[in-house]
Image (cartoon, rainbow, N blue to C red):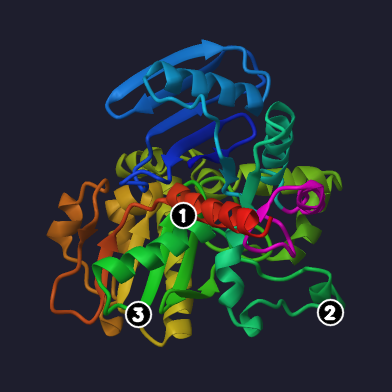
Amino acid sequence: MQLLIANLGSTSFKSKLFDMSSDTPRVPIASGAADRIGQGNSAWEVRVGDRELEGTADLADHGAAIDAILAGINELGVDTSSGIAGVGFKAVHGGPISGAVVVDDGVLDTMEQFSDVAPAHNPPYIAAMRAIAEKWPDTPQVAAFETAFHQTIPLSRQVYGVPYEWTQAGVRRYGFHGASHRYIGERVGEVMPEAKRVISCHLGGSCSVCAIDAGKSVYHSMGMTPQTGVFHTNRVGDFDTFALLKLLPMHDGDLDTVFRRLGKEGGLLGISGVSADMRDVEEAAANGNDRAQLALDAFVESVRTQVGACLMALGGVDAIVFTAGIGQFGKGVREGVCRDLAFAGVELDASLNDQATGRDEQRLDAGGTAAAVWVLPTDEEWVVARQTQDVLQSQTANA
């Protein structure tokens, strides 16, 4: 069973092709990516083992991107002529829909209803799903929603202090990055089975912190939308909604402009004025840029606040894990987050932290402490591949 797993942006497409019937199903047999979709002169690339192929084409939509990537994969010797058994999506917001489900009109309609609170995520996924359905009408698609992993969070940590009818209408904390945090919880269970209380720090372009108790999510930093919690590279994170009363007059009452700026000009970019890329901000701070240094300090404090919430939810911690781009490669961020946490049994070994490559699984604590500190590269696509396989096998069994 060959499964194509997709991770999308509005003009980008990243994918991995898994052979779930192989002896090593976890290792993708191929991967591919395309950007500037719908903008002309799109660049695409594919990788099979240590071989690569790349090119440019006018990719009108995500369906055309898939065609280009599969053609490249076939050219590199991977036979997909028998057809892809299914396409799995790391979908973001399905509101009341939880878990992994077969994509149909009802799923698409619900995703559209929640596009207003996931504007950077739902629209490109909906467009891609429709394009693939038109191109491959007989190929099932599965949406594995990021919110599913967080259904085990107690209701008292899901609700806002709002009129209860709003909660009943779906205004609550959902939590995201579910595939990543699920993978971290599972992987810690493999490399350190005695660690039951895990704090997973997914720090990248989008950032979140999750408390995992015996493999189950019990707290997550994000709320109703992926804009919340820890502030991100260019998104605001937690924010006092009543500040809108001050911001609206500054923007001629244009709420769309305010939300656009909060969603695209906030976070590291907004504070530093330098870049949304952590590496650029760190370089500027090292060169004496005070705003860049403030952005770094504020980012670390934002993460530490959520780590503290996780400590309370778990009653302590056995392992703290850093993953995603900033988590894996941000030595200074890891040092800052773990600072003064000896009271919780967390002590980072400065030498190990400095030597860490970020590309491999590495343990970075001082040893002999109550809590371990790990860098663990996440594998969201593998999680989605397994969920997709389960859905398709269940569908076949019930046919």
Q: Is residue 231 visible?
A: no
Mark 2 and mark 3 in contact (Cβ < 8 Å)?
Answer: no
- In the image, 296 versus 58, the foreground residue is 58
Asked if residue 36 is positioned above or below residue 300 in the image, the reply reads above
Identify the residue position indicated by label 3 in the image: 196
Q: Which numbered disc flags the more N-terminal residue, 3 or 2?
A: 2
Horizontal side of residue 4 vs 293, given as left or right? right
Asked if residue 90 is positioned above or below residue 297 in the image, the reply reads above
Q: Secondary structure at mark 3?
A: loop
Q: Secondary structure at mark 2?
A: loop
Q: Residue at x 65, y 76 (%)?
A: 158
Q: Which numbered disc flags the more N-terminal residue, 2 or 1?
A: 2
Figure quadrant of residue 365: bottom left
Amino acid at the residue labelled 1: Val
Amino acid at the residue labelled 3: Lys
- Residue 376 placed where, x, y %? 31, 57
**Crowd class of label 3 (few under 14; some 14 to 19; many from 20; radius 10 Å):** some
Q: Which mark is residue 383?
A: 1
Q: Which residues are magenta?
A: 93-117
Spatial separation of the CA atoms under disc 3 and disc 2: 36 Å
Asked if residue 236 is positioned above or below residue 124 in the image, the reply reads below
**Crowd class of label 1 (few under 14; some 14 to 19; many from 20; radius 10 Å):** many
- In the image, 305 versus 380, the foreground residue is 380
Identify the residue position indicated by label 2 in the image: 163
**Crowd class of label 2 (few under 14; some 14 to 19; many from 20; radius 10 Å):** few
- Residue 235 placed where, x, y %? 59, 49
- Residue 115 part of the magenta-drawn span: yes
Given this view, does label 2 or label 1 mark the residue nearer the observer?
A: 1
Mark 1 and mark 2 in contact (Cβ < 8 Å)?
Answer: no
Figure quadrant of residue 212: bottom left
Spatial separation of the CA atoms under disc 2 and disc 1: 36 Å
Q: Is residue 96 visible?
A: yes
